[in-house]
Amino acid sequence: MGSPRWKVAVAAFLAVVGSLLPVDADEHEHTYTDKEEVVLWMNTVGPYHNRQETYKYFSLPFCAGNKKTISHYHETLGEALQGVELEFSGLDIKFKDEVMQTTYCEIDLDKPKQDAFVYAIKNHYWYQMYIDDLPIWGIVGEADENGEEHYLWTYKKLEIGYNGNRIVDVNLTSEGKVKLMPNTRIAMSYSVKWKKSDVKFEDRFDKYLDPSFFQHRIHWFSIFNSFMMVIFLVGLVSMILMRTLRKDYARYSKEEEMDDMDRDLGDEYGWKQVHGDVFRPSSHPLIFSSLIGSGCQIFSVSFIVIIVAMVEDLYTERGSMLSTAIFVYAATSPVNGYFGGSLYAKQGGRRWIKQMFIGAFLIPAMVCGTAFFINFIAIYYHASRAIPFGTMVAVCCICFFVILPLNLVGTILGRNLSGQPNFPCRVNAVPRPIPEKKWFMEPAVIVCLGGILPFGSIFIEMYFIFTSFWAYKIYYVYGFMMLVLVILCIVTVCVTIVCTYFLLNAEDYRWQWTSFLSAASTAVYVYMYSFYYYFFKTKMYGLFQTSFYFGYMAVFSTALGIMCGAVGYMGTSAFVRKIYTNVKID
């Protein structure tokens, strides 16, 4: 077991198994007997304002205790990808066994070690530890008022609460401030105090939550505001749909009396003029169908993961959210293949194998490419966020041996079950020329404006999500997130339907890409908002944190855009089929 290569292989194997099978997030059962060993894991250390810039705890010249009998490997893929670097502290802690202040090691402070601690103190470094899966945070040290002298905290005072045979609370107090001077010995000490607690084991993470932040009145107001927007847009779409059907029935029953509103809303023949071209295949159908399939899969993953998070409280386990998302993404690959493959077949595509590969690897390639780029920077910084080679192998195995076969199954089902072009109108052999129209009816303008309302319905929730990921808030209000997801989908569908209706009324039948891109433009506004958040709401700095932030925000925004584009297109497609099915065309 001593070979590093062997450890990497074991880590990769456990990562694959952990990603495909449900496993406990901790090596313990969370129950203890008196005097049983309790492990204090040292996780990471890093600057306070750069949450993602983390390093191994012992990358600073800290010393460990004398105990050497514990070994640890990553247990889940999520832990490995998130840079969880658990190392045994070497401290001897036993359940309900109090420890008076005890020196566990000494640091021979030479000039390089002093410089390392001084740099950490100047950049407000703090560290994270775990006891029984409960996180503990402590600060490395502090400077005097003038910033000329620096002090290291040397005494870790642990107070652990227990309820029966379970640990339900952990608190750390840092004491023993020692001035950093070269060529001195600094004694590191700790103590452990146990106390009974009335906190239930199921509620032990409540102390880490911030109800006053997430359940603020502005949060509820944003939901109410978005809900009113939904009512307005649904009413607008219903009016358009009812108008088209009603005017058609009025025309064919030769009703001469029509109200003023119907006359003012425009030429009734506009959208009917393009009935022979409206179902014409989109340009670049291979890419288009792959994007639609990927968007449908992202929506499925978002919906399922939010439901699981609502039921299981995933925030209580390290890396469980990311592991769940990867598992669900792999399991929902048939959704991608089904919708992408069926749409490609309906549009007359023949290179279905190429379409399947592009659809299967579109999102994984984007995520892995970004992660690979950031990994180079993380390796340069020696950060714990650097993804191990074994974890990369595990992700590749999931892509080739899980995602691709399931995508193939979905593609075959989609092509055979719903791949026939059953359009309500015949497609003309020669495309109809598109007449000139006003500038604001051009597809480019519609695309730019289409994402404003969907972004307006979610930007408050974006603030809470950003703060939980890029700062130190634990996001737990997944009921809000589910409601916002539903509102986003409804608003997106309604907006794209309205945009498509006016486009078709202008006798422009290029609605497929327009509906997709107008909905997907929401992502552009989200990414623009991320710039505002970075410069005005955070104190992040440095190449690593900046690259990490804008790299993964680009991935998040792109995935959100693809999802919104697919949702918008699917809703608009149903609307277009509806109006051309129910209205007779001469």
Image (tube, rainbow, N blue to C red):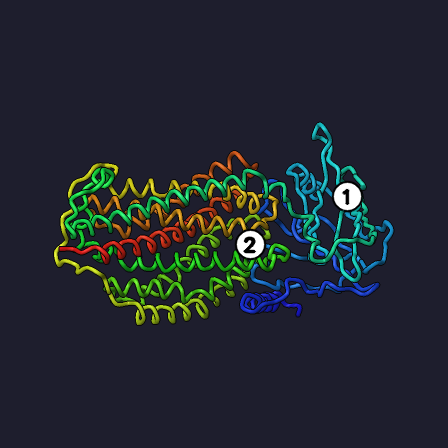
Q: Measured along the vertical axis of the image, is residue 70 above or below residue 48?
A: below
Label whose residue precedes the other's in the sequence (2 or 1): 1
Q: Residue at x 54, y 43 (%)?
A: 464
Q: Residue at x 81, y 60 (%)?
A: 95
Three-letter code, disc 2: Ala
Q: Report the front residue among 142 and 191.
A: 191
The quadrant of the picture occupied by the N terminus is bottom right
* Residue visible at 73% across and 49% down in the picture: 62
Q: Residues within 10 Å of mark 1 (few under 14, many from 20)?
A: some
Task: Give the percent coordinates (x, y) of residue 445.
Answer: 28, 40
Instruction: Name the side, left or right, on which 38 lies relative to 538.
Output: right
Residue 85 horizontal side relative to residue 547, left or right: right
Q: Which residue is mark 1?
A: 174
User: Which of the 4 quarters of the picture holds residue 527?
Assistant: top left
For the point 75% across and 59% down, the residue is: 39
Foreground mark, 2 or 1, reads: 1
